[in-house]
Image (spheres, helix red, strand yellow):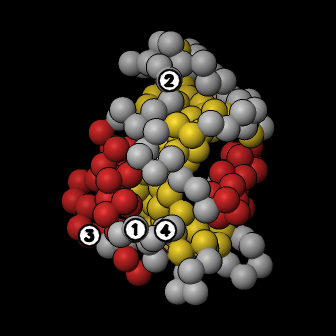
Amino acid sequence: MPLSLANPVLLDVWTYWCEKRAGRRAPLFGDIDLDTLGRLARNVLVVERDESGRFRYGAVGSSIQTIYGYPMEGMYLDIALPPERRKPAIARYTLACETGRPLLARSAYTVSERLGFLVDRIILPLARADGSIGGALSGQLMRPTMQGTPLGDPLSSAQTDEEQIIFLDEAGQAAPTPGLALR
């Protein structure tokens, strides 16, 4: 399955962000009110970049916290995430902050010999009061995999050591970005 906004969770987060953006490059952190998202909020998180360049979770949806098994709000990504997932996560948010562009990402990771997850994310820049990009709103859809075969997505090409990333244009379509991949 190609990486796209076809999933309703990702599309709803995109639509919300576009409404809050209101023609600007990115909405302000203060424009985001997760309480207005209803059930969608359980698949959403807000990440903020501090002055030193480190990323911290501002809000983490309940389905994401259930998978990780602990409250993550206020924690830095380089502490909250398992060592093998830190670098790719930080790279995704760095890319969104430095380019100011919305992106979609897909990755897969293994929890045990028999269980893993295929994760589709939309990562949408958020602005500070001065207009600089200082973090992101992210919608995540995590699907369990068993014995290396994604449930409900047998055609996925994501591997545990590979991440697919595409930028989105103003209409939410894939923007040409040759050779973009994080490892």
Mark 2 vs mark 1, CA separation in Å: 28 Å
Residue 60 appears in which quarter of the rendering?
Answer: bottom left
Where does the image place residue 103, in percent across and percent down from the top left?
Answer: 55, 47
Quick one: label 2 or label 1, which is nearer the N terminus?
2
**What kind of residue is marked 3?**
Asp
The nearer-to-camera label among 1 and 3 is 1
Residue ID for mark 1: 23
Numbered circle sitting on residue 2: 2
- Look at the numbered disc 4 and give the secondary structure of its residue: loop
Label 1: few (<14), some (14–19) or many (≥20) C-alpha neighbours in 10 Å: few
Residue ID for mark 4: 26
Q: Residue furthest bottom?
A: 130
Where does the image place residue 178, in percent across and percent down from the top left?
Answer: 72, 33
Quick one: label 2 or label 4, which is nearer the N terminus?
2
Label 4: few (<14), some (14–19) or many (≥20) C-alpha neighbours in 10 Å: many
Q: Say which residue appears at 67% left-offset and 38% top-offset.
A: 177
- Where 39 falls versus 71 (above or below)? above
Mark 2 vs mark 3, CA separation in Å: 31 Å
Front position in the image: 103 or 159:
103
**What kind of residue is marked 1?**
Gly
Q: Report whether residue 99 is seen.
A: yes
- Look at the numbered disc 2 and give the secondary structure of its residue: loop
The nearer-to-camera label among 2 and 3 is 2
Residue ID for mark 3: 35
**What kind of residue is marked 2?**
Pro
